[in-house]
Amino acid sequence: MAATNGDAELTVAEEAKEEEEATDDGSGGVSSQWLRAAVLGASDGLVSTAALMLGIGAARPADARAVLLSGLAGLVAGACSMAIGEYVSVHVQLDVELADLERRRRRGGPAPAGLGLHAAAAAVSRPGQAAAASALSFAAGAALPLLAAWFVAGAYRVRVVVVVATASLALAAFGAAGARLGRAPGGRAGLRAVVGGLLAMAATYGVMKLFRTHGV
């Protein structure tokens, strides 16, 4: 049984490699996929951390330390969550592919030519690399609003303006970069990223402001 599983893993990996070679047109398609994933991870880290900091600040505007600590906690927790989630999801994808391959073999049918996916190849050879990449991209995005607030010594309103401005500029850049990597226009993608991020920050700020208003 162990030998069968090993053979199945090798088969999936080989098929994934063949599919990758067949679909890669020499323009760095696989690298672009990794870069787009990194951009998305950085955007997630940026939005969630900035929103968290603004929310805590809305509830406790005079406590700059609480804002910074919440941002740091969000960075660490989010990076760990991204790493674990990526590691698990990559192996789940592999398990699904192997189970499908085993069912087809038991039925006596041929293995499908397109069964191997890029995710399956990654699961066989580098799940740790995928997890580390997700964690680092999230942490890189989360560090931007955290550092912006860290170096602001002014009043709470100044910190809010700096965090929102930093997040907006970075989101515009991330959105445009992600679209460019997918060979799509970057302007609209950047605008959508900024609008979405501002909505998330505004919602978090508004909810936490209600808690402060009602003395919770």
Image (tube, rainbow, N blue to C red):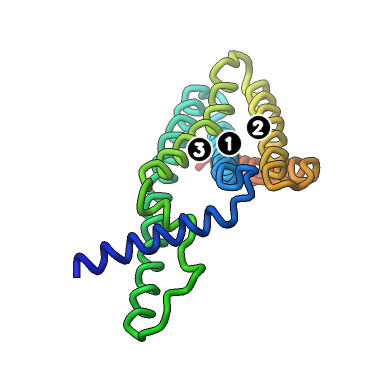
Residue under the point 32% across and 66% down? 8
Tell me how far mark 1 sits from mark 3, CA to CA.
7 Å
Mark whose residue sits in front, 1 or 3: 3
> Disc 2 vs disc 3: Cβ atoms closer than 8 Å?
no
Which residue in the protein does label 3 denote?
Answer: 138
Which residue in the protein does label 1 denote?
Answer: 46
> Disc 2 vs disc 1: Cβ atoms closer than 8 Å?
yes
Q: Please indicate, yes or no, whether residue 92 appears anywhere in the rendered image.
A: yes
- For label 2, the crowd category at 10 Å Cα-Cα, with few meaning under 14, some 14 to 19 and many 20 or more, is many
Tell me how far mark 2 sits from mark 1, CA to CA.
7 Å
Residue under the point 38% across and 73% down? 101
Q: For the residue marked with disc 2, what is the amino acid?
A: Ala
Can you say whether 27 is above or below 88 in the image?
A: above
| Quadrant position of residue 22 | bottom right
Which comes before the other along the chain, label 2 or label 3? Answer: 3
> Disc 1 vs disc 3: Cβ atoms closer than 8 Å?
no
Q: Is residue 59 left or right of residue 96?
A: right
Task: Please name whichever residue, 208 or 22, is drawn nearer the observer in this view of the structure.
Answer: 22
Across and down, in percent, residue 96 comes to 39, 68
Residue under the point 24% across and 69% down? 4
Can you say whether 41 is above or below 139 in the image?
A: below
Secondary element at image label 2: helix
Task: Please name whichever residue, 163 or 116, is drawn nearer the observer in this view of the structure.
Answer: 116
Secondary element at image label 3: helix
Q: For the residue marked with disc 3, what is the amino acid?
A: Phe
Tell me how far mark 2 sits from mark 3, CA to CA.
14 Å
Which comes before the other along the chain, label 2 or label 1? Answer: 1
Can you say whether 196 is above or below 136 in the image?
A: below
Which residue in the protein does label 2 denote?
Answer: 167
Q: Is residue 73 left or right of residue 190?
A: left
Q: For the residue marked with disc 1, what is the amino acid?
A: Leu
Q: Please indicate, yes or no, whether residue 208 appears anywhere in the rendered image.
A: no
